Image (tube, helix red, strand yellow):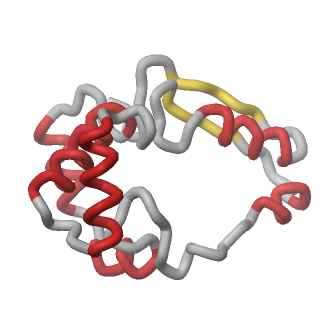
Amino acid sequence: MKTLPDSRQTAIATHEAEKSYTAADYQAAVNEFDGKYVWRRPVQAELDSVMATVNEGIYTYMQDPSEFTIAGTLEQYNATPFLKDVKVAVLFTVGEFDEGDPPTVKRHAQMTPGAKYAVIPNAAHLVE
Protein backbone atom coordinates (compact mmCIF):
# COMPACT_ATOMS: atom_id res chain seq x y z
CA MET A 1 0.00 0.00 0.00
CA LYS A 2 2.90 2.35 0.76
CA THR A 3 3.85 2.37 -2.94
CA LEU A 4 0.54 4.02 -3.89
CA PRO A 5 0.22 7.80 -4.20
CA ASP A 6 -0.58 9.68 -0.99
CA SER A 7 -4.15 10.37 -2.13
CA ARG A 8 -4.77 6.62 -2.55
CA GLN A 9 -3.22 5.85 0.84
CA THR A 10 -5.43 8.51 2.42
CA ALA A 11 -8.54 7.06 0.77
CA ILE A 12 -7.66 3.59 2.02
CA ALA A 13 -6.99 4.77 5.58
CA THR A 14 -10.14 6.90 5.70
CA HIS A 15 -12.51 4.30 4.33
CA GLU A 16 -11.02 1.41 6.28
CA ALA A 17 -11.56 3.42 9.48
CA GLU A 18 -15.15 4.11 8.39
CA LYS A 19 -15.63 0.59 6.98
CA SER A 20 -16.94 2.25 3.82
CA TYR A 21 -15.37 -0.18 1.36
CA THR A 22 -17.67 0.70 -1.54
CA ALA A 23 -16.62 4.37 -1.70
CA ALA A 24 -15.46 5.35 -5.18
CA ASP A 25 -12.03 6.62 -4.10
CA TYR A 26 -11.44 3.50 -1.99
CA GLN A 27 -12.35 1.27 -4.94
CA ALA A 28 -10.05 3.33 -7.20
CA ALA A 29 -7.19 2.76 -4.74
CA VAL A 30 -7.93 -0.97 -4.61
CA ASN A 31 -8.00 -1.11 -8.40
CA GLU A 32 -4.65 0.66 -8.63
CA PHE A 33 -3.14 -1.72 -6.06
CA ASP A 34 -4.59 -4.75 -7.85
CA GLY A 35 -3.17 -3.54 -11.16
CA LYS A 36 0.31 -3.49 -9.65
CA TYR A 37 0.31 -6.48 -7.31
CA VAL A 38 -2.60 -8.82 -8.09
CA TRP A 39 -2.86 -8.79 -11.89
CA ARG A 40 -0.57 -6.83 -14.16
CA ARG A 41 -1.73 -7.73 -17.66
CA PRO A 42 -4.98 -9.63 -17.27
CA VAL A 43 -6.76 -11.29 -20.13
CA GLN A 44 -10.24 -9.94 -19.38
CA ALA A 45 -12.09 -13.20 -20.10
CA GLU A 46 -9.74 -15.12 -17.80
CA LEU A 47 -9.97 -12.51 -15.06
CA ASP A 48 -13.77 -12.54 -15.34
CA SER A 49 -13.72 -16.33 -15.02
CA VAL A 50 -11.54 -16.22 -11.90
CA MET A 51 -13.61 -13.50 -10.27
CA ALA A 52 -16.85 -15.37 -11.02
CA THR A 53 -15.62 -18.28 -8.90
CA VAL A 54 -14.61 -16.24 -5.82
CA ASN A 55 -16.81 -16.99 -2.84
CA GLU A 56 -17.08 -13.49 -1.36
CA GLY A 57 -18.86 -14.77 1.76
CA ILE A 58 -16.05 -17.11 2.73
CA TYR A 59 -13.37 -14.62 1.71
CA THR A 60 -14.92 -11.87 3.82
CA TYR A 61 -15.40 -14.23 6.76
CA MET A 62 -11.73 -15.21 6.69
CA GLN A 63 -10.09 -11.96 5.49
CA ASP A 64 -12.57 -9.10 5.94
CA PRO A 65 -13.84 -6.81 3.18
CA SER A 66 -10.49 -5.02 3.24
CA GLU A 67 -7.57 -6.16 1.12
CA PHE A 68 -5.19 -4.27 3.38
CA THR A 69 -6.20 -5.18 6.92
CA ILE A 70 -6.99 -8.72 7.99
CA ALA A 71 -9.80 -8.61 10.54
CA GLY A 72 -11.58 -11.89 9.80
CA THR A 73 -10.91 -15.33 11.28
CA LEU A 74 -7.38 -15.31 9.81
CA GLU A 75 -6.40 -12.23 11.82
CA GLN A 76 -4.61 -14.23 14.53
CA TYR A 77 -3.72 -17.29 12.43
CA ASN A 78 -0.03 -18.08 12.03
CA ALA A 79 1.06 -21.39 10.49
CA THR A 80 4.76 -20.57 10.26
CA PRO A 81 5.63 -22.61 13.38
CA PHE A 82 4.41 -25.72 11.52
CA LEU A 83 6.57 -25.22 8.42
CA LYS A 84 9.53 -26.96 10.08
CA ASP A 85 7.41 -30.11 10.34
CA VAL A 86 6.46 -30.41 6.66
CA LYS A 87 7.54 -33.79 5.33
CA VAL A 88 6.63 -33.51 1.63
CA ALA A 89 8.25 -31.73 -1.29
CA VAL A 90 7.22 -28.09 -1.47
CA LEU A 91 7.70 -25.51 -4.19
CA PHE A 92 6.98 -21.95 -3.12
CA THR A 93 6.24 -19.70 -6.07
CA VAL A 94 5.72 -15.96 -6.03
CA GLY A 95 5.35 -13.33 -8.71
CA GLU A 96 8.07 -10.71 -8.96
CA PHE A 97 5.42 -8.05 -8.20
CA ASP A 98 3.18 -10.22 -6.03
CA GLU A 99 1.21 -8.78 -3.12
CA GLY A 100 2.58 -11.77 -1.17
CA ASP A 101 6.02 -10.26 -1.71
CA PRO A 102 9.08 -12.35 -2.67
CA PRO A 103 11.04 -11.74 0.57
CA THR A 104 8.14 -13.07 2.67
CA VAL A 105 7.65 -16.14 0.49
CA LYS A 106 11.41 -16.79 0.46
CA ARG A 107 11.45 -16.62 4.27
CA HIS A 108 8.66 -19.23 4.40
CA ALA A 109 10.55 -21.45 1.99
CA GLN A 110 13.63 -21.21 4.20
CA MET A 111 11.53 -22.34 7.18
CA THR A 112 10.38 -25.46 5.29
CA PRO A 113 12.84 -28.39 5.13
CA GLY A 114 14.00 -29.07 1.58
CA ALA A 115 11.60 -26.56 0.04
CA LYS A 116 12.35 -24.91 -3.27
CA TYR A 117 11.59 -21.28 -4.04
CA ALA A 118 10.99 -19.64 -7.41
CA VAL A 119 10.13 -16.10 -8.46
CA ILE A 120 8.04 -15.78 -11.61
CA PRO A 121 9.44 -12.80 -13.54
CA ASN A 122 7.07 -9.94 -14.41
CA ALA A 123 4.16 -11.65 -12.63
CA ALA A 124 1.87 -10.42 -9.91
CA HIS A 125 -0.31 -12.56 -7.63
CA LEU A 126 -2.30 -13.99 -10.52
CA VAL A 127 -0.01 -15.18 -13.26
CA GLU A 128 -1.16 -14.26 -16.75
The foreground one among 10 and 112 is 10
Instruction: Name the residue: 14% across, 52% down.
Output: 25
Q: Residue 74: percent from the left, percent from the top?
A: 56, 74
Q: Say left or right for 97 vs 111.
A: left
- Res 90 → quadrant: top right
The foreground one among 43 and 79 is 79
Instruction: Name the residue: 25% across, 53% down.
Output: 11
Establish if 94 lies above or below 53. Answer: above
- Res 17 → quadrant: bottom left
- Res 41 → quadrant: top left
Q: Residue 60: percent from the left, percent from the top?
A: 36, 75
Q: Say left or right for 128 vs 112.
A: left
| Quadrant in which the N terminus is drawn | top left
| Quadrant in which the C terminus is drawn | top left
The foreground one among 87 and 4 is 4
State the count of labels: 0
- Identity of the residue furthest to the top in this view: 121
Instruction: Name the residue: 89% across, 56% down.
Output: 84
Instruction: Name the residue: 28% across, 74% down.
Output: 19
Q: Residue 95: percent from the left, percent from the top?
A: 50, 30
